[in-house]
Amino acid sequence: MVIVDDHAAIAAGVRSWCSQAVPPIELVDAGDRLADVWTGPGAAADVVIFDLELVPRRPDFGELRRLVDNGRRVIVYSQHTDDATAIKCVDLGALAYLTKREGPDHLVPAIRAAARGEPYTAPSLSGALIADDAPGRPRLSQRETEVLRAWFVASSKELVAAKLNITVKTVDTYIARVRVKYANVGRAARTKSELVGRALDDGLITLAELNETAT
């Protein structure tokens, strides 16, 4: 695991929590050096703990998106307590959003979950999700989105399974979950083409990506 945070005290605290966890969690401290997430020991870390605001008053949503798009499993650990920031980070693909008021009781389980590719909902995020009033948008996990995108550009579920190193049954399970979530918000998608339409509407994939695959 690698942490990117410009406050040495925060990084030291997280290192202490990780060393006391059972089993202990190995931590690479990148300080405020984003480059260290992409090179050296940080590049091999299975989880990135990301301070959203390395530059004061400039939350770096772009870097969060870059990390997620490159398959990194990200926990945003931030001083921002507003619901809008939390929701945006989750929408961009963070597996967890924790405020720096939330200590090891939540950060350590979030790290364990992220290492498995699973989301973790801390109390601050739970409140933000309850308050989220965006209509008609199912909340897909990062893995659900990943499987869905892979399926859209593949000719078979077998190819998706091979690409993501999972079984075809697991692919079916993720797609079924996505269908249920869309149905629950009143936007049923019973066919692949209908799901593609929903995903285009919600920005999960672009026409350019679909066209590039078709050519």
Image (cartoon, rainbow, N blue to C red):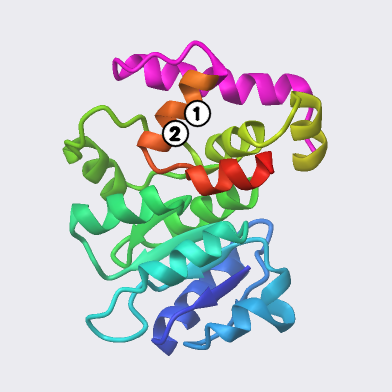
Mark 1–mark 2 distance (CA, rounded to whole Å): 5 Å
Q: Residue at x 49, y 11 (%)?
A: 190
Return the mark for residue 89: none
Picture residue at 49% right of the left edge, 72% below the top: 14
Q: Could you tell me residue 204's position as x and y percent? A: 45, 42
Give coordinates of residue 32: x percent, y percent.
47, 87
Above or below, 20 relative to 206 = below
Residue 148: x and y, percent?
Answer: 58, 33
| Rendered image: mark on residue 199 | 2
Q: Is residue 181 magenta?
A: yes
| Neighbour tally class for label 1: few under 14, some 14-19, many 20 plus, Cα within 10 Å | many
Q: Which residue is at 58% across, 38% downward?
A: 149
Q: Contact (CB < 8 A) between labels 1 and 2? A: yes
Q: Which image quarter holds the N terminus?
A: bottom right
Amino acid bearing label 1: Val
Name, please, the residue furthest toward the top.
190
Tell me if residue 205 comes above or below residue 155 in the rendering.
below
Q: Is residue 12 magenta?
A: no
Please give the residue where the numbered disc 1 appears in the rendered image.
196
Q: Main secondary structure of the magenta part?
A: helix
Closest to the observer, 84 or 175: 175
Q: Secondary structure at mark 2?
A: helix
Work out which quarter of the rendered image holds the C terminus and state it: top right
**Which range is magenta?**
165-192
Place of residue 192 in the rendered image (x, y in percent of width and height, measured from the top left): 56, 19
Instruction: Pick the residue in front: 118 or 199.
Output: 199
Q: Secondary structure at mark 1?
A: helix
